[in-house]
Image (cartoon, rainbow, N blue to C red):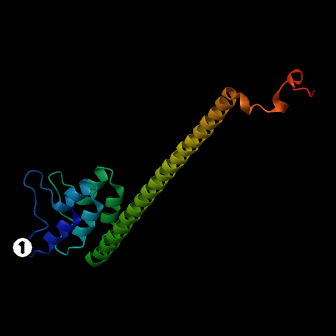
Amino acid sequence: RVATLEVLLKCPRVNPNLICPANKSSALHLAAANGKGQAVMCLLANEKVNRDLKNINGHQAMQCAQGKGHFKVESLLKQKIPPEKAAQMLKQQQRNTDLSRKKAAAREKREQMEKNKSQKNKEKIEEEFKLLGSMAADIENDLNAENRDNDEDPESIGIGDLPPMMSPTKA
């Protein structure tokens, strides 16, 4: 993590040019070889860092980045950025990263809210359909009951409902 590296580099007893005995690589070599641009910038922002150190293969950090295809890191190392400028660039990069994270979090929250809103609308529509279905069933039951009552009650048949030959005659 860059924040940890920054804290370590502020400690006067820390040697940023310490070499790994196994491969003679410095922290700058390792950051460059692994494409860690922010770590490279953090190291370059420290006046004590020696960019010209060579590892066991005789490569500088820039060549380690190039060999692993980390061309952005290679370009940072080629520019020979002074430590003050590297520190400014690192701060700007960190601000941009923070801003990007905040934007991503806001976008994710908005999407979640839309999803929740959509789910609530779906639930509301389903509830309304159930209510309409229930109302339709009640109306149908009422009509069926009314029809059954009409079929069973001969008194409910009006004169106009009788066939013509069954109409009462006046005497």
Q: Nearer the viewer, residue 103 or 24?
A: 103
Residue 97 percent across, percent down from the top left: 35, 66
168 relative position to 115: left or right: right
Residue 157 percent across, percent down from the top left: 76, 31
**Circle 1: element type:** loop
111 relative position to 141: left or right: left
Q: Nearer the viewer, residue 92 or 110?
A: 110
Residue at the (25%, 64%) spot, across then down: 40
Which of the 4 quarters of the picture holds residue 38? bottom left
Which of the 4 quarters of the picture holds residue 143? top right
The extreme top residue here reads 165
Residue 107 percent across, percent down from the top left: 43, 60
13 relative position to 148: left or right: left
The extreme front residue here reads 171
Residue at the (10%, 74%) spot, across then down: 11
Name the amino acid, label 1.
Answer: Arg
Q: Nearer the viewer, residue 106 or 41?
A: 106
Residue 109 percent across, percent down from the top left: 40, 60
Residue at the (83%, 31%) spot, across then down: 159
The extreme bottom residue here reads 84
Q: Is 126 above or below relative to 18?
A: above
Q: Is residue 60 visible?
A: no
Q: Is residue 96 visible?
A: yes
Tell me the quadrant of the picture where the C terminus can be found.
Answer: top right
Residue at the (24%, 69%) spot, across then down: 42
Tell me the quadrant of the picture where the N terminus can be found.
Answer: bottom left
Q: Nearer the viewer, residue 105 or 80?
A: 105
Residue, disc 1: 13
The extreme right residue here reads 171
